[in-house]
Amino acid sequence: MGGKNSKKNANPELTEPEIEFLLNNTKFDRDGIIRWYSDFLRDCPDGKLDKKEFEKIYSQLYPGGNPARFSKYVFDVFDADGSKYISFTEFMLAMTALSDTDVTKRLRLTFQIYDVNDNHQIDVKEMTKVIDALYDLKDVPKDERKGELSASNRAKAIFSKLDLDESKGLNVDEFVNGCLGDEFLIRLLLPEGSQ
């Protein structure tokens, strides 16, 4: 009865090289990594967190909002190898990045979320999409998304402040340096939970 099926359905093991990599690249100790892995396998028995499961996590964090679009942007950044799922290692690296106390590092990660087309530049259109997705995520009422508070007008206002060379695109340094000088922009642009 056991034979082939029990091996096929067994949870993947966390290898010593993976533990060593995480010890060297995250803030977690060995016991913490093993605890996180156990929890990760409880939710993802095959060791793979897909977009649908990732969106469920965001749904729990934002029960009144619609996390579909924003969670997709974040998922794409965390899926570093483009495999269409987040491995435990990618998950732990993301957890470390989101909880880092260094605002510059968090802003660099946030830049990647806003860089939807992954060309190392953010344009007004990309920023508008992500701000609109943030509005959905946080369930901002439609009447609070009008006029100067609309995603499009917010993106344009941010660009007028950060795009100093008027290139119509922000590179990571312009984004980070501009945000570091403005507490309001940091609160607006950093994903919730990473501030």
Image (tube, grey):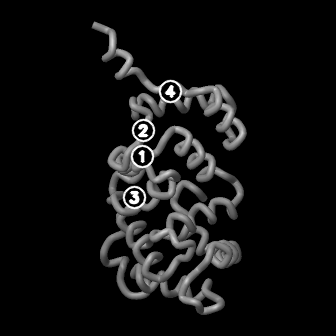
Q: According to the image, label 2 marks what residue?
A: 48
Report how far apart the C-alphas of labels 4 and 1 lie in the structure. Answer: 18 Å
Q: Secondary structure at mark 3?
A: helix
* Residue type at the position of mark 4: Ser
Whole-percent x, y for residue 183 in the image: 65, 72
Q: Quadrant of residue 134?
A: bottom left
Whole-percent x, y for residue 118 in the image: 50, 68
- In primary-sequence order, the first of circles 4 and 2 is 4
Report how far apart the C-alphas of labels 3 and 2 lie in the structure. Answer: 16 Å
Residue 54 visible in this rendered orientation of the protein: yes
Q: Secondary structure at mark 1?
A: strand
Residue drawn at x 50%, y 81% as measured from the top left: 123
Contact (Cβ within 8 Å) of mark 2 with mark 1:
yes
Disc number at residue 72? 3
- In primary-sequence order, the first of circles 1 and 3 is 3
Disc number at residue 85? 1
